Image: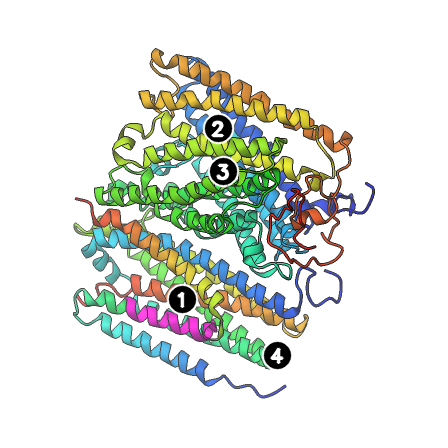
């Protein structure tokens, strides 16, 4: 792209570029829905086959960390939405602070997840490493935990990418050309909110079943 | 070069390997695909040599498993899926819609690098000893029991999958957002409609492949996973996930070929495509319905009878839009002024061979017959008729049609026609006997067979040797044309599309002036002269 | 540079989401049998819709964006429904 040009030659205007970028991000989000979707199908297939085992296994997940993490992620999504709003009103410093806040919350999520994994290691709940579950529901429970670790690890990888993005934007606000940063941040925000939505459903599938027994 | 074109806008390696020009990226893909095509072809050659005799004389059973696996993996993921979209699509789509490039040119380059990275990892798996699971990687063999390089192959294909996703994303956004002024959806060439439909599948199906490969890799790595029967896992879950992607994948492979055929049939009949809207919507219908049929690969695997019935029914339905296209192409030919240039020979071959392939698909969609035909050579013949007789043929047709535009050179028409005819002959000799073999019960993926099957196998292997020569021919006469061919005019075929309204080869930014479209596509005058879309 | 404050819809959504989180956890501990799963997923859907409509600004977007946003979900529905069919109807 020639220096100083606000948008690449295949676009007709800045608005054209912005709308196209958002469009592209939604297409990408659709791919991610299906990526996690394959795991969700697996979950439902085995929950249907081993309902008692899934309930029992779910009771062994840490509802405190799970709930705390959900609240943390919902709040970080709020902060990112605020950051986008702030930037659109030229409040650069505020926007940067909000993004850093969201990234810190994201790191807090990852840290708590780490503690949670460590607890699960101690309780012998990691298939392929040290899984040991008493009783006849062991197989179904193991399937639950295979799903649990794969889904939350995949989610965590997406979180780390998102945290990296938020940090990068926090650093670059005010330095690069205004409208490009706004557009790019908008796309990154969509990604972050999507990661939040995935967690909303993972929370419902992982932490909540079986609590009433 | 007489004038400035994308080819002489920089001669350094850097200007090629760090390009964001969709035309150069198309060339990068094209070169890579030639390489992979011949590797996959080498595996096929070994297979057909082995199968010429009933005994195992060339390779061991283990080696044979690795050969057909390699053939499948390379041909599916590293040739057929990227073939038209990433070479012809990358080059022609922006030109056809009057744009300066794709929506995200750097993502386009990234997709090529991912493709090459994935290809390299997969080639490493093959060179290190190969994979013996078949390209279908069924669990629990692939996850728990195979001693071959499954992990490396899975990683290679996983990486290449991202290349697919980025390509699909780029095309969808480009077609929605970067069309020239006046280019409404119903003025788009049908090649674009087909690539749009292909891109929808690329974007929505490939992620399922990604998660399935992740699940295989984890189960292989940790020795336990969700497909493991020992802990109550269901291997059929793997098959559902795998085929949810892999059935739409076959439509990823064939839809672009159908898109090319639209362009060829129209140009060489000098007529607009009959039933344009039907063909356009049929492309989308194929893409959508193609997601609803995957269980027809699992009729005998233990799937519930109800599910099998539903999938069988849907498999009959999905044939309808394809049939609509074949009827419309035939109607296009009717009362056209037909010219038998090489691209047209390929297009006509496509119609016949794809129809045979498609009809035999209906045999297989029929539950009762599939019980006998599944995992026999009938299936092998069916999909080769579609993939090779259909898709590869269409690819070659498109390659010849757009060759003057891409390279600025004209190839030898005599050699091209001879190659097309030889390919047609060699192809049928190779694969028609396989229908007979399958109907008589010869199973696929076996390198030994009862002696009574030898006659057909020898015919098939003989055909394959002819096919091999025939596929090598274009390498020579097209290669020759690059250096010694006559310079091509802007519109050697007198076709009305936007891509023909710029020079051959095009300048770096495609058009000197932004085209404005005023006409429907495929318009020819009473005297069969093209009426350009932007005149 | 103005003094920026978060807009009311954003704050209301955030608080609403946290309230729904509290609700879903509380309901999970009630003995509703099969309805527990329905409640958990139902509340999850509401939370997701709030994030999508307000945070992801879909409420301000036109039909084409909405279709694209919904497409992934629609195809997911196909995967889940047709994919489960085999497992639910085995005899």
Using residue B405 as the reference point, say whether residue C71 is left or right of it: left
The tally of labels here is: 4
Kindly give the residue lying farthest to the right in the view shown.
B2
Magenta stretch, residue numbers: C41-59
Mark 1 lies on residue:
A197
Sequence order check: which comes first, mark 2 or mark 3?
2
Residue B15, image x, y percentages: 74, 47
Q: CA distance from mark 3 to mark 1?
A: 49 Å
Q: Are marks 3 and 4 in contact (CB under 8 Å)?
A: no
Q: Nearer the viewer, residue B330 or B304?
A: B330
Q: Is residue B377 magenta?
A: no
Residue B241, image x, y percentages: 36, 46
Residue B242 visible in the shown view: no
Number of the label disc, if any, that sits on residue A92? 4
Q: CA distance from mark 2 to mark 1?
A: 43 Å
- Subunit of mark 4? A
Mark 2 lies on residue:
B129
Residue C48, image x, y percentages: 38, 69
Task: Please name which of the two marks, 2 or 3, marks the residue nearer to the observer.
Answer: 3
Question: Are the residues flagged by discs 2 and 3 from a single subunit?
Answer: yes
Tell me the residue at 57%/78% (across/down): A95
Number of the label disc, if any, that sits on residue B330? 3
Q: Quadrant location of the C terminus of chain B? A: bottom right
């Amino acid at each position: 792209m020639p220096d100083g040009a606000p948008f690449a030659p295949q676009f007709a205007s800045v608005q054209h570029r912005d709308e196209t970028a958002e469009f592209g991000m939604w297409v990408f989000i659709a791919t991610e829905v299906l990526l996690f979707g394959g795991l969700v199908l697996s979950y439902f297939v085995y929950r249907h086959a081993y309902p008692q085992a899934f309930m029992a296994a779910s009771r062994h997940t840490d509802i405190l960390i799970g709930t705390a993490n959900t609240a943390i992620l919902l709040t970080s999504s709020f902060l990112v939405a605020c950051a986008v709003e702030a930037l659109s009103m030229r409040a650069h410093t505020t926007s940067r602070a909000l993004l850093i806040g969201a990234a810190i919350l994201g790191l807090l999520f990852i840290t708590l997840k780490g503690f949670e994994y460590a607890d699960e290691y101690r309780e012998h709940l990691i298939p392929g490493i040290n899984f040991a579950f008493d009783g006849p529901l062991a197989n179904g429970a193991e399937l639950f935990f295979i799903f649990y670790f794969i889904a939350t690890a995949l989610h965590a990888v997406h979180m780390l990418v998102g945290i990296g993005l938020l940090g990068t934007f926090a650093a670059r606000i005010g330095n690069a050309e205004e409208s490009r940063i706004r557009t790019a941040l908008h796309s990154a925000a969509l990604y972050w909110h999507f990661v939040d939505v995935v967690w909303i459903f993972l929370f419902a599938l992982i932490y909540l079943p079986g609590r009433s027994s | 070069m007489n004038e400035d074109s994308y080819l002489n806008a920089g001669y350094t390696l850097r200007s090629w390997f760090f390009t964001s020009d969709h035309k150069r990226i198309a060339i990068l893909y094209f070169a890579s695909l030639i390489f992979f095509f011949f590797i996959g072809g080498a595996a096929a050659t070994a297979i057909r040599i082995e199968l010429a005799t009933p005994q195992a004389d060339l390779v061991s059973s283990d080696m044979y498993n690795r050969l057909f696996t390699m053939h499948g993996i390379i041909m599916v993921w590293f040739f057929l899926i990227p073939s038209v979209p990433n070479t012809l699509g990358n080059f022609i789509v922006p030109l056809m819609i009057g744009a300066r490039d794709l929506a995200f040119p750097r993502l386009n380059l990234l997709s090529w690098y991912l493709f090459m990275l994935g290809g390299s990892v997969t080639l490493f798996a093959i060179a290190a000893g190969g994979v013996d699971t078949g390209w279908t990687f069924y669990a629990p063999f692939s996850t728990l029991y195979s001693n071959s390089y499954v992990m490396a192959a899975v990683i290679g294909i996983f990486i290449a999958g991202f290349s697919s996703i980025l390509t699909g994303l780029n095309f969808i956004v480009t077609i929605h957002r970067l069309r020239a002024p006046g280019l409404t959806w119903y003025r788009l060439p049908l090649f674009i409609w087909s690539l749009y439909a292909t891109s929808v599948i690329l974007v929505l199906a490939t992620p399922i492949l990604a998660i399935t490969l992740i699940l295989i890799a984890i189960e292989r790595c940790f020795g336990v996973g969700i497909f493991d029967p020992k802990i109550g896992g269901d291997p059929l879950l793997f098959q559902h996930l795998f085929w949810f992607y892999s059935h739409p994948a076959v439509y990823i492979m064939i839809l672009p070929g159908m898109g090319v055929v639209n362009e060829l049939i129209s140009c060489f009949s000098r007529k607009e495509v009959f039933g344009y809207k039907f063909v356009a919507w049929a492309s989308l219908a194929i893409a959508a319905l193609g997601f609803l049929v995957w269980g027809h690969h699992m009729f005998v695997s233990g799937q519930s009878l109800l599910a099998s019935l539903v999938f069988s029914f849907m498999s009959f339905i999905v044939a309808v839009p394809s049939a609509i296209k074949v009827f419309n192409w035939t109607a296009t030919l009717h009362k056209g002024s037909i010219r038998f240039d090489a691209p047209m020979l390929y297009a006509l071959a496509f119609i016949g061979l794809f129809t045979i392939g498609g009809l035999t698909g209906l045999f297989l969609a029929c539950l009762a017959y599939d019980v006998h035909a599944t995992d026999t050579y009938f299936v092998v013949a069916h999909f080769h008729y579609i993939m090779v007789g259909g898709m590869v043929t269409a690819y070659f047709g498109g390659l010849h049609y757009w060759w003057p535009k891409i390279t600025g050179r004209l190839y030898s028409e005599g050699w091209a026609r001879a190659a097309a005819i030889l390919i047609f002959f060699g192809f049928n000799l190779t694969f028609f006997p396989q229908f007979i073999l399958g109907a008589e019960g010869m199973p696929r993926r076996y390198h030994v067979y009862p002696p009574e099957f030898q006659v057909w196998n020898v015919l098939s292997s003989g055909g394959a040797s002819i096919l091999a020569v025939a596929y090598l021919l274009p390498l020579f006469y097209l290669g020759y044309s690059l250096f010694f061919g006559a310079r091509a005019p802007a519109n050697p075929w007198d076709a009305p599309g936007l891509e023909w309204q710029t020079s051959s080869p095009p300048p770096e930014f495609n058009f000197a002036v932004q085209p404005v479209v005023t006409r429907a596509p495929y318009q020819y005058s009473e005297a069969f002269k093209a009426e350009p879309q932007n005149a | 540079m103005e003094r920026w404050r978060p807009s009311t819809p954003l704050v209301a959504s955030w608080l609403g989401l946290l309230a729904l989180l509290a609700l879903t956890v509380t309901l999970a501990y009630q003995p509703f049998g099969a309805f527990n799963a329905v409640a958990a997923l139902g509340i999850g859907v509401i939370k997701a819709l709030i994030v999508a409509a307000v945070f992801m600004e879909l409420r301000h977007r036109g039909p084409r964006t909405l279709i694209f946003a919904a497409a992934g979900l629609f195809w997911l529905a196909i995967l889940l429904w047709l994919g489960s069919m085999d497992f639910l109807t085995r005899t």
